[in-house]
Amino acid sequence: GDSVTQMEGPVTLSEEAFLTINCTYTATGYPSLFWYVQYPGEGLQLLLKATKADDKGSNKGFEATYRKETTSFHLEKGSVQVSDSAVYFCALSDFTGGFKTIFGAGTRLFVKA
Amino acid sequence: DTGVSQNPRHKITKRGQNVTFRCDPISEHNRLYWYRQTLGQGPEFLTYFQNEAQLEKSRLLSDRFSAERPKGSFSTLEIQRTEQGDSAMYLCASSGRQGNHGYTFGSGTRLTVV
């Protein structure tokens, strides 16, 4: 079945450092890919998405590119802030799965001032 | 629209009791999803509705769990004869006609079974 694998955390960075969180997926169809973010004490929020190969999703300085050849959707940000400290979830949604979304286990990010 | 609303936010119950959670989705969204999230894990799919029809149930959803969405509006998730292993955050999300554009999640109901 469909699955998502993302790098284990926690990831600890200093403010203004470059962030990469790796995500790879397995899917039988042509899924849409997502990154969701969960800030402390809050619910999950959609951060960005890409619906087809080579699409780049972006939001709040975060970017991720849908790479079909490597089945990857890595999250990047050029300069992180303390306020980016959260748990980040990579996810996919596939028509063959009835458009239910499959989530990775999450990667916790700590950003130090 | 105030987004997806879940009630209660927290529920503590004794083992063996029944509990019911409610989810009010975004009004124009016809798809509604229930997920369960335990500490340190990503959300796990439980079930989803398109309008009032329950289209899929996960194997995680034992016969003690039942969900309804009467009239295609709000939804309820009931757990009968709760067990300590049911302790988790129960998340509700909704989406438009095509779920491949992402979900809007509620804040969740945290269940603790003692």
Image (cartoon, grey):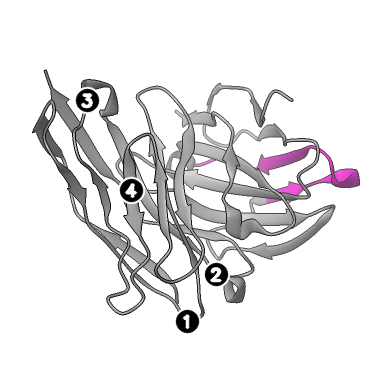
Is tag 3's residue or tag 2's residue first in the polypeptide sequence?
3
Q: Amino acid at mark 1?
A: Thr
Which quadrant: the N terminus of chain A? bottom left
Is tag 3's residue or tag 1's residue first in the polypeptide sequence?
1
SS at circle 4? strand
Residue B72 sits inside the magenta stretch: yes
SS at circle 3? loop
Disc on res. A94: 2
Q: CA distance from mark 4 to mark 2?
A: 21 Å
Q: Looking at the image, which is closer to me, B79 or B71?
A: B71
Residues at discs 3 and 1 both on one chain: yes
- Please, which chain is the residue tagged with disc 3 on? A
Q: Amino acid at mark 4?
A: Glu
Q: Are marks 3 and 2 in contact (CB under 8 Å)?
A: no
Badge 2 crowding class, 10 Å Cα cut-off, few under 14, some 14 to 19, many 20 or more, is many
Q: Looking at the image, which is closer to me, A59 or B89?
A: A59
Is tag 1's residue or tag 4's residue first in the polypeptide sequence?
1
Q: Which residue is mark 4?
A: A63
Residues at discs 3 and 2 both on one chain: yes
Judge whether residue B90 can be spotted in this image: yes
The mark lying in front, picked from 3 and 1, is 3
The mark lying in front, picked from 3 and 2, is 3
Disc on res. A28: 1
Residue A113 sits inside the magenta stretch: no
Q: CA distance from mark 1 to mark 4?
A: 25 Å
Q: Are marks 1 and 4 in contact (CB under 8 Å)?
A: no
Q: CA distance from mark 4 to mark 3?
A: 15 Å
Is tag 1's residue or tag 2's residue first in the polypeptide sequence?
1
Disc on res. A81: 3
Badge 1 crowding class, 10 Å Cα cut-off, few under 14, some 14 to 19, many 20 or more, is few
- Please, which chain is the residue tagged with disc 2 on? A
